[in-house]
Each structure stands twice: as structure tokens, then as C-alpha cells.
Image: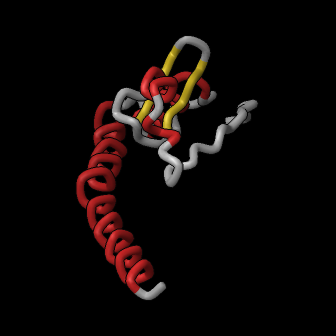
């Protein structure tokens, strides 16, 4: 997909994701999120699906075929529910180790 994009850096340490303006875009206060005109999408998986359905020239990234799409959804949900949680635990542990050593 060839898309024209612009990015806005959200400083989590300054809690820019917890402002009223940001909550208007994403009521959970999490990143990433996408604004496409009047449409606001949050969660990386939902953003990927939105972009593939709206802008992809083929259905290779997010198939229309039910069984092929099921496989893609399995991978998305596995990452969201299993891999992300494990990575989060590792990152928190590393941050704790780093902060206690300063």
C-alpha cells in the first residue's frame, strides 16, 4: 500500500496519552491510534485491518476468503493475547532492573 501519512509523536513519559484531547481520539489512552478523516481507530490490530480493508489493492494482507481470514485472525489474536502479554512482562522487568541501578 502506498499511503501518504503523517505521524504525531506521543510522549508517554509526559503522559500526553492521558490528556482530554487524546482521549477524544482514543478513550483508552493507549497507542497506537489512527485518525483518517472523521474515523478514529485504536489498537494496532484494528488499525492493520482497517488499513488493509480500506486501502489494499488486493486481499492478500487480509483475505476475503473465510478460512484464510480465520488464519490471519488467529495470528492477530495470538499476538494480542499471548505474545504481547509476555513481552510486556519482560519490558516491565527490564525497566525495574534499570531504574534500581541508576
Q: How many marks?
A: 0
Residue 101 vs residue 73, the one in the foreground = 101
Residue located 43% across and 37% down the image: 18
The answer to which quarter of the image holds residue 6 is top right
Residue 58: give x, y in percent of width and height. Answer: 58, 30
Residue found farthest to the front: 102
Q: Residue furthest bottom?
A: 101
Q: Is residue 65 left or right of residue 49?
A: left
Q: In this image, 49 relative to 86: left or right?
A: right
- Is residue 64 visible in the rendered structure shown here? yes
Front one among 18 and 28? 18
2 over 96 or under it: above or below: above
Residue 61 showing in the rendered view: no
- Between residues 2 and 59, which one lies in front from this camera angle? 2
- Residue occupying the point 67% across, 36% down: 1
Q: Position of residue 37 (x, y in %)?
A: 61, 14
At horizontal 42% and vertical 78% (from top left) the residue drawn is 99
Please tell me whether residue 14 is drawn above or below residue 84 in the rendered image. Answer: above
Q: Position of residue 66 (x, y in %)?
A: 30, 31
Spot occupied by residue 69 in the image (x, y as percentages of width and height): 35, 37
Amino acid at each position: 500500500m502506498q499511503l501518504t501519512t503523517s505521524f504525531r509523536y506521543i510522549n508517554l513519559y509526559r503522559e500526553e496519552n492521558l490528556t482530554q484531547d487524546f482521549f477524544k481520539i482514543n478513550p483508552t489512552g493507549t497507542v497506537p491510534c489512527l485518525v483518517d478523516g472523521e474515523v478514529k481507530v485504536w489498537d494496532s490490530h484494528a488499525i492493520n485491518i482497517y488499513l488493509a480493508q480500506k486501502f489494499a489493492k488486493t486481499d492478500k494482507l487480509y483475505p476475503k476468503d473465510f478460512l484464510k481470514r480465520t488464519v490471519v485472525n488467529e495470528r492477530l489474536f495470538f499476538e494480542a493475547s499471548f505474545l504481547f502479554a509476555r513481552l510486556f512482562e519482560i519490558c516491565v522487568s527490564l525497566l525495574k532492573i534499570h531504574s534500581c541501578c541508576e
